[in-house]
C-alpha cells in the first residue's frame, strides 16, 4: 500500500517518501510522518533467517513506497558493505545481564552511520525521481557524531554540498578531529560559539527562511537535512531493532513472540523513536527505556507530562546527548494527539514562545510504554567500570548512561524481561572519559597516548577510524557566532 507523508504541523500532506527525504523538514517547521505505521509482512521466524541487508529491505520497502525494489536494493547494497568492519553490520554482545546492540561498526564509529551510510543514496535517487536540477545542500547541526557521519556519507557525492555546524566546546577531541580532517571538495564545517541547541535552532531557522530559500534557488541550490528530523534517517534506524530481535530468536536467546525491553541512550529522540516504530510494526517490544544524562529534560517529561527546556545546559562526558530541545519527540507528541496537527502545532508554538508545554492526560497515557531514567557523571563512570570489571566488555559514556539507567530500572521494577541496550559509539571516540572511568582521573593531555593506553588496558583494538585521524591534516578551521550561520552558508556556497 502506498504511504504518503504529512507534516506534524499540518502545513503539508500527500508528500511522497522521496519528496519528504529531499525536503528534510516540512515547510511549516513540522516533521514528516507517514500516513500510517505499516506492519511487517514477514514473520519474525522468516526474518530470523535474513541478513542485515535483507532485513533492511523488508523494513524500508514498507515506508519508502515510491522507490522501486531495484532502487531500494541498490541503495542498501551500496550502504551496508565493507565500510562496516563486520558482516553482521550490527552485532549483539551479551554482557552483564543485557544484550548490547553494537551500532558503531560503520566508518565513523557511532550509530549515526547506520542511517547516514544510506541517506546519500536515498537522496540521490530521490533527486532523480523528482527531476531536481538544483544542487542539494545538506545543512546539518551536530552534537558531535552526525556531522562526521553525514560528511563521510556525502563526501564527493555528485550534486550535493554538505555543511556542518558543531558547538566549539561541546564535542570530544576525537569527534572534532574527525570533522576538521574530513576530505571531499563538497564538505564544509564550522564550529559555532554556542551549544548544540543553538546550532540546531540556527539550522531550523535557515530552513524556515523562505526569502533565503528563494535566493538559493536562483543560484541553483536547495536545502535538505541529514539530521534525524529527516524521515530518511528515521526509517533505516528501525531496521536494527527488527534485526536484533530476529537475531535473538535465531540464537535461541528468546522464544518466538517473547517480549523484550530496549534501553536507548537518548538525545534528539531519533533512535528510541525508531524502536517505537519497530514495536508498532509488530516487534514484541514491551517497555522503551529512555536514558538521559544530566540534561534530563526527557526524564522530567515522562514523569510529569511537562516538557521544560528552561534550565541550564550541562556539558557532560556523553556530549551527543547534551540536548535540551529533543526534536523527534514532536513525532511522538503528534501521534499521542491522535495525529492532530493543530494540537501538536499549538504545543510546539508554546515550546518556541516560552520554552515549555504540557501534554493532556490522554496523551501522557498514550506514552505509557516509555519509561524515563537518567544518570549523573559519577554514576555513568561507575557503570562503565562495573561492566568492564565484571565482564571485560568496554562501553562508551553514552552506552554507560544507558547501562546505568537499565540497572536502576531493574532495581526499581524487578522486571526480569530481557533487554537490549543500544550501544551507540565506540569507546575510542571518548577514550579520555572511558579511561578515567576504569582507571581514575588522567593527567595525560595527549589524546592519542590516552587511546594507546586504553588499548593496552582493555585489549580492544583501536578502530581504523581512529588510526586515520592520527596524522590526517586539518582541512577546516571556520569558527562563527551562532547568529552568523546564514552568512557562513552563503560563504561556503560561493
Ligand atoms: C546521536 C547519539 C545519541 C543520541 O541519539 P538520538 O537519536 O539523538 O536520541 C546517543 N549516543 C551517541 C553516541 C550518539 O551519537
Image (cartoon, rainbow, N blue to C red):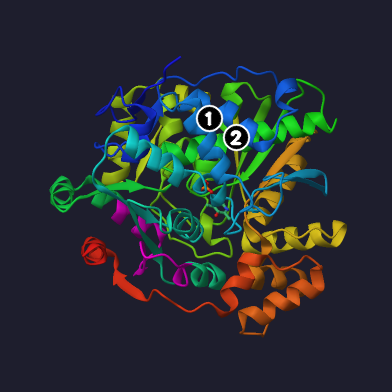
Q: Residue at x 53, y 61 (%)?
A: 319
- Front residue of this view, candidates 360 and 482: 482
- Front residue of this view, candidates 421 and 353: 421
Instruction: Indicate which disc residue 363 carries.
Output: none
| Mark 2, secondary structure of its residue | helix
Task: Determine which quarter of the picture holds residue 443.
Answer: bottom right
- Is residue 18 found left or right of 205 in the rendered image? right
First in residue order: circle 2 vs circle 1: 1
Q: Which residue is mark 2?
A: 239
Q: Which residue is mark 1?
A: 60
Compared with residue 81, is residue 1 higher up or lower down, i.e. above or below? above
**Circle 2/circle 1 CB separation < 8 Å:** yes
CA distance for labels 2 and 1: 8 Å
Q: Can residue 360 be seen here?
A: no
Compared with residue 208, is residue 104 higher up or lower down, i.e. above or below? below
Q: Residues within 10 Å of mark 1 (few under 14, many from 20)?
A: many
Horizontal and vertical percent for residue 95? 82, 49
Compared with residue 425, is residue 326 higher up or lower down, i.e. above or below? above
Q: Residue at x 63, y 38 (%)?
A: 240
- Front residue of this view, candidates 76 and 30: 76
**Some atom of ligand 1 lies within 8 Å of the CB belonging to the residue at label 2:** no
**Residue 334 is inside the magenta segment:** no
Horizontal and vertical percent for residue 368? 57, 28
Horizontal and vertical percent for residue 85? 68, 55
Q: Which residues are magenta?
A: 179-203
Amino acid at each position: 500500500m502506498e504511504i504518503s507523508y504529512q507534516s506534524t504541523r499540518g502545513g503539508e500532506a500527500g508528500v511522497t517518501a522521496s519528496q519528504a527525504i529531499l525536503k528534510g523538514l516540512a515547510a511549516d517547521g513540522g516533521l514528516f510522518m507517514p500516513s500510517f505505521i505499516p506492519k511487517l509482512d514477514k514473520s519474525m521466524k522468516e526474518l530470523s533467517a535474513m541478513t542485515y541487508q535483507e532485513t533492511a529491505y523488508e523494513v524500508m520497502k514498507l515506508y519508502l513506497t515510491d522507490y522501486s525494489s531495484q532502487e531500494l536494493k541498490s541503495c542498501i547494497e551500496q550502504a551496508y558493505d565493507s565500510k562496516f568492519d563486520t558482516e553482521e553490520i550490527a552485532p549483539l554482545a551479551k554482557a552483564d545481564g543485557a544484550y548490547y546492540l553494537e551500532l558503531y561498526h560503520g566508518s565513523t564509529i557511532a550509530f549515526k552511520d547506520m542511517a547516514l551510510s544510506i541517506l546519500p543514496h536515498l537522496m540521490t535517487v530521490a533527486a532523480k525521481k523528482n527531476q531536481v536540477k538544483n544542487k542539494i545542500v545538506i545543512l546539518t547541526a551536530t552534537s558531535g557524531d552526525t556531522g562526521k557521519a553525514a560528511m563521510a556519507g556525502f563526501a564527493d557525492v555528485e550534486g550535493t554540498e554538505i555543511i556542518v555546524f558543531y558547538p566549539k566546546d561541546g564535542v570530544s577531541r576525537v569527534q572534532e578531529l574527525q570533522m576538521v580532517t574530513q576530505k571531499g571538495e563538497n564538505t564544509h564545517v564550522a564550529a559555532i560559539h554556542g551549544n548544540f541547541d543553538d546550532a540546531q535552532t540556527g539550522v531550523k531557522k535557515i530552513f524556515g527562511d523562505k526569502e533565503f530559500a528563494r535566493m538559493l534557488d536562483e543560484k541553483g541550490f536547495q536545502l535538505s537535512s541529514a539530521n534525524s528530523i529527516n524521515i530518511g534517517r528515521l526509517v533505516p534506524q528501525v531496521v536494527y531493532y527488527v534485526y536484533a530481535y530476529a537475531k535473538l530468536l535465531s540464537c535461541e536467546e528468546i522464544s518466538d513472540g517473547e517480549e523484550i525491553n530496549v534501553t536507548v541512550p537518548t538525545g534528539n529522540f531519533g533512535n528510541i523513536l525508531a524502536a517505537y516504530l519497530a514495536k508498532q510494526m509488530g516487534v514484541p517490544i514491551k517497555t522503551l527505556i529512555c536514558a538521559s544524562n544530566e540534561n534530563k529534560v526527557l526524564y522530567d517529561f515522562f514523569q510529569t507530562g511537562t516538557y521544560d527546556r528552561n534550565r541550564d545546559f550541562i556539558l557532560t562526558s556523553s556530549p551527543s546527548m547534551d540536548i535540551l530541545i529533543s526534536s523527534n519527540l514532536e513525532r511522538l507528541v503528534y501521534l499521542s494527539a491522535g495525529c492532530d496537527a493543530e494540537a501538536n502545532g499549538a504545543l510546539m508554538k508554546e515550546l518556541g514562545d516560552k520554552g515549555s508545554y504540557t501534554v493532556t492526560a490522554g496523551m501522557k497515557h498514550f506514552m505509557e510504554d516509555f519509561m524515563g531514567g537518567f544518570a549523573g557523571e559519577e554514576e555513568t563512570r561507575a557503570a562503565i567500570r562495573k561492566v568492564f570489571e565484571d565482564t571485560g566488555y568496554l562501553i562508551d559514556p553514552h552506552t554507560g548512561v544507558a547501562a546505568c539507567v537499565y540497572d536502576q530500572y531493574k532495581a526499581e521494577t524487578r522486571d526480569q524481561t530481557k533487554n537490549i541496550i543500544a550501544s551507540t559509539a565506540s569507546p575510542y571516540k571518548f577514550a579520555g572519559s572511558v579511561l578515567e572511568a576504569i582507571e581514575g582521573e588522567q593527567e595525560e593531555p595527549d589524546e592519542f597516548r590516552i587511546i594507546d593506553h586504553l588499548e593496552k588496558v582493555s585489549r580492544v583494538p583501536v578502530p581504523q577510524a581512529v588510526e586515520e585521524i592520527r596524522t590526517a591534516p586539518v582541512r577546516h578551521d571556520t569558527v562563527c557566532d551562532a547568529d552568523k550561520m546564514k552568512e557562513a552558508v552563503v560563504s561556503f556556497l560561493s
